[in-house]
Amino acid sequence: MLTFQCPYCGVQACETELAAGGEAHLKRFGPGSSDDDFEGYLFLRPNVKGVHFERWRHAMGCGKWFLAARCTATLEVFGTYPAQTTEPPADIIAAIKARRPDWSLT
Amino acid sequence: MRRYSAFAIAREAMRHHLGWERAWKSPVPKARYDVIIVGAGGHGLATAYYLGKNFGIRNVAVIEKGWLGGGNTGRNTTIIRSNYLQDPSAAIYEKARSLYETLSQDLNYNIMFSPRGVMMLAQTEHEIRGYQRTAHANALQGVTTEFISRQKVKELCPIINIDGPRYPVLGALWQPRGGTARHDAVAWGYARACSDMGMDIIQQTEVTGVRREGGRVVGVDTTKGHIACDKLGIVVAGHSGVMAERAGFRLPIESVALQALVSEPIKPVMDVVVMANTVHGYMSQSDKGEMVIGGGADNYNNYTQRGSFQHVEETVRALIETFPIISRLKMLRWWGGIVDMTGDRSPIISKTPVEGVFVNCGWGTGGFKAIPGSGWAMAELMAKGHAPLADAFSLDRFREGRFIDESVAAGVAH
């Protein structure tokens, strides 16, 4: 069973307390953008097998959205961080590199 | 190929069963093929089969990373039905269901198609309206279904508790010619027929890269070296995103785990397939007597082929209320498969941005029932450039907003 530490209330929350919210750090495209950009933002996902940045909501706890880095091939969780960021923080990247030396943020 | 028949069994019985030949060959890959299909599951093998049978394209290789039929083809709950709401879905699933009717004779391989009837329980007022609408749509589409009363449900499946306090049964959508088939046999039967047509089925070989020249596919790199091809079909279900990345494009797909479980075998207690979408559970009894139970998919990206305990609990808890008889059954096996979900819960059978590369994916939680129809449509698309059954399922429907929205129509378990 997946467990994440909620970065807001500090609780170790298991997946029954949480709601998954899909990929994190999507770049949003709105009116006036090209069809390609809009399609990419709305539908196309890399769907990585490996390190995945994603959104979760502590639905049965504090109710807040947070972000997490997790491996989709092994379910290993590298860390969680607040949702008010546009890219993964340095300590999360360091935690991933410690476990996956070949991995790089692309 | 030696044909299977009652006479063949009698002949082999006289000589200690020494005359059976291998069902398919395991050849060394050639340097070049007209068509390469990646993925030897049901959909990939059916595509190859209909390429050969309907279009005479026989210089074909089917390349499989693991073993034949070892992915979702061997992990589903074997339900076959075609009671879909949208016209394009009903067309392709009904094509598949009708091909299943005669597939054993067509392949000379017993796939044990059992049209025992599928009922989808209506347990809320909303579901009654939804299924009545589907029944009307099916009447226009030429798919035989009917909305039946709760008394008829009880008559068809006496072990159902129709007066459950929380989930009373109010009626059901009944498809009398839906049912089940032996899932492995579908893959094995297609593989044997493909091998017989001279196609190469190459197992334990991973496609690691797609070679392109001027925006067109020229071959694939595999763990057994480079193989050239004119056309490439990617039919890899859960790993579609990974293969698309190797071919240089992205797909509107996310991969999640879907799980199922079977109980210990018991005497025959139900001879229909029952799906209960309100409680995310469905159940049928296999020929061995095991109760085959499926539930909802996890909602986060996952490639591990493992499910979550709480989904099993959720599914079984709800089913026990509808089927009190199963409350003391022990569960024998429990497994997960990786399913490829699209936003509108409909598949993708399409050309791609790379010329000569075709994808067949996005079947999500309901691919097994579609195998013959999916292969039929994909083969026509690869041979002729378009196919009546496949055109609505093209990749550009997302860009153009032409969704085939079965997520609203079925929600789960389809």
Image: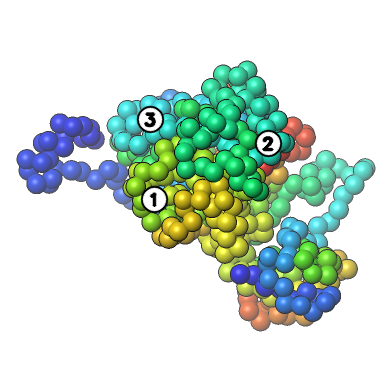
- Report the quarter where the N terminus of chain B lies: top left
Q: Which mark is residue B127?
A: 2
Where is residue B243? Give x, y as percent.
Answer: 58, 52
Horizontal side of residue B198 vs B244, given as left or right:
left
Q: Residue at image x 49%, y 46%? A: B283
Q: Chain of mark 1?
A: B
Chain for numbered disc 2: B
Closer to the camera in the image, B236 or B150: B150
Instruction: Sort mark 1 into few (<14), some (14-19) or many (20+) by Cα contacts within 10 Å.
Output: many
Specify few, some or many for label 2: CA neighbours under 10 Å numbering under 14, 14-19, or 20 or more. Answer: many
* Amino acid at pointer 3: Leu
Q: CA distance from mark 2 to mark 1?
A: 29 Å
Q: Residue at x 53, y 29 (%)?
A: B152
Give the Cα distance between marks 3 and 2. Answer: 33 Å
Same-chain status of marks 2 and 1: yes
Rendered position, A103 above or below B9: below
Element type where label 1 sits in the image: loop
Q: Quadrant of residue B62?
A: top left
Q: Residue B262, image x and y in percent? A: 44, 54
Question: Label 3 is found on which chain of the structure?
Answer: B
Residue placed under numbered mark 3 in the picture = B103
| Quadrant where the image shows the C terminus of chain B | top right
What amino acid does circle 2 point to? Glu
Residue receiving disc 1: B290
Q: How is the image coloured?
A: rainbow
Q: Can you give x and y, in whole percent of width and height, for residue B363 in the image?
A: 58, 42
For mark 3, give the secondary structure: helix
Q: Nearer the viewer, mark 3 or mark 1?
A: 1
> What's the amino acid at mark 1?
Glu
Q: Please tell me whether residue A89 is drawn above or below residue B279 in the rendered image.
A: below
